[in-house]
Amino acid sequence: MAKYSMSRLIGSALLLVLGCGASGLGVAEERIAVKVMIISMFNLEGAPWLAALKPEREIRVPGLSSDFPTVHCTASGVCQMTTDMGHANAAASMMAVIYSGQFDLRRTYFLIAGIAGINPRYGTIGSATWARYLVDVDIAHEIDAREMPPGWSDGFFGVLTNGQGQKPQFAYRTELFQVDEALLQKALQLSRHAALEDSPDVVAYRKFYPGAPANAPPGVTQCDTASGDTWWGGHLLGERATRWTRLVTDGHGVYCTSQQEDNATLVALTRGAQSGLTDIHRVAVLRTGSDFDRPYPGQSTFDSMVAQRSVAGAIRTSTANLVHAGMPLVKDIVEHWEQWEAGPHTLPKSTAAAPPRAAP
């Protein structure tokens, strides 16, 4: 009896703390129940969502970036936040929201929606990709390529391994995440026929690539994403990302987009799940191509990286297509909440698979 009473006392104190909100007055406040939290990384990614959602409420959250200090919410339970760019900002901002005590995120679906470099073998500028695997390509040993051993394809190899081709032990527990298969398949199904935007200057630029899908109009597909704070480009590093993704996923992953934040965001959401504040089964990752990760034939890698900055339509179409591809999932969750509330595990078993996880 004494043990039960003490547990209730501790639980009540925790709820009081979580309910305090930003005022710090120690008075429990009702937390905002969120059905969908859309996670953007910078202002141009967030703007199309705010224009489409027209949120009625702004909630200031201590610990968010000073450039993006508020979470925007609609009356229907859809919220949007902007983490700011890079691993550190993504993790810090996500943790701030999870532990702010201002939101009930236990049944929330998180939609990470951002732009990325794209592998021309799997998509084009404006293409929308849903990830199954999130691979951190920054966690590795690196030897300058001018000093690497003979026969190596590049200067990277796994942490505490003895050479290329050896799978690392994942000591950081942040190197690999896998999203829920049932949720992934539902997102693909809902967005398959989304009308994606294009732009004349993007159409002209992609013609330099000799084959589809690089030179074709944007579409929706499934392929995997690589996280890393270095803005790299080129065939050799692209092939390195391809090999690394294949290695750490035991041959199942298919690299197609490069970005900075996704593994860091998943780490924060995993910590939240371990605290009973989020459900890591409810995370979807959408990335649209804003630039090619490697040059077209006859173009140098440096020229490719510089030239694509002048393709103004690339940012506009890729950010707009985040909404076009992601909104069908958001709307379905809100409009059919009674089907979604219990979680992706209630979907047909034929599409279910392992939950999102950090690699052991």
Image (spheres, grey):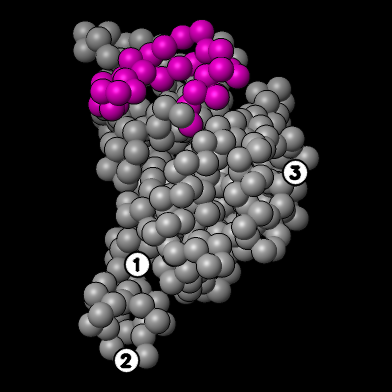
Taking the image as shown, residue 141 lies to the left or right of residue 190, namely left
Asked if marks 2 and 1 touch (Cβ < 8 Å), the reply is no
Secondary structure category for the residue under label 2: loop
Kindly tell me whether residue 147 is visible in this rendering: yes
Which quarter of the image is occupied by the N terminus?
A: top left
* Disc number for residue 150: 2
Residue at which label 1 appears: 170
Which quarter of the image is occupied by the C terminus?
A: bottom left
Q: Nearer the viewer, residue 118 or 313?
A: 313
Q: Position of residue 75 (x, y in %)?
A: 56, 11
Amino acid type indicated by mark 2: Pro
Between label 3 and label 1, give the one nearer the viewer.
3
Q: Earlier in the sequence, mark 3 or mark 1?
A: 1
Q: Is residue 57 magenta?
A: yes
Q: Is residue 275 magenta?
A: no
Amino acid type indicated by mark 3: Arg
Amino acid type indicated by mark 1: Phe
Question: Magenta segment, which residues?
Answer: 45-74
Residue at which label 3 appears: 192
Q: Position of residue 247 (x, y in %)?
A: 47, 74
Cα separation between marks 2 and 3: 45 Å
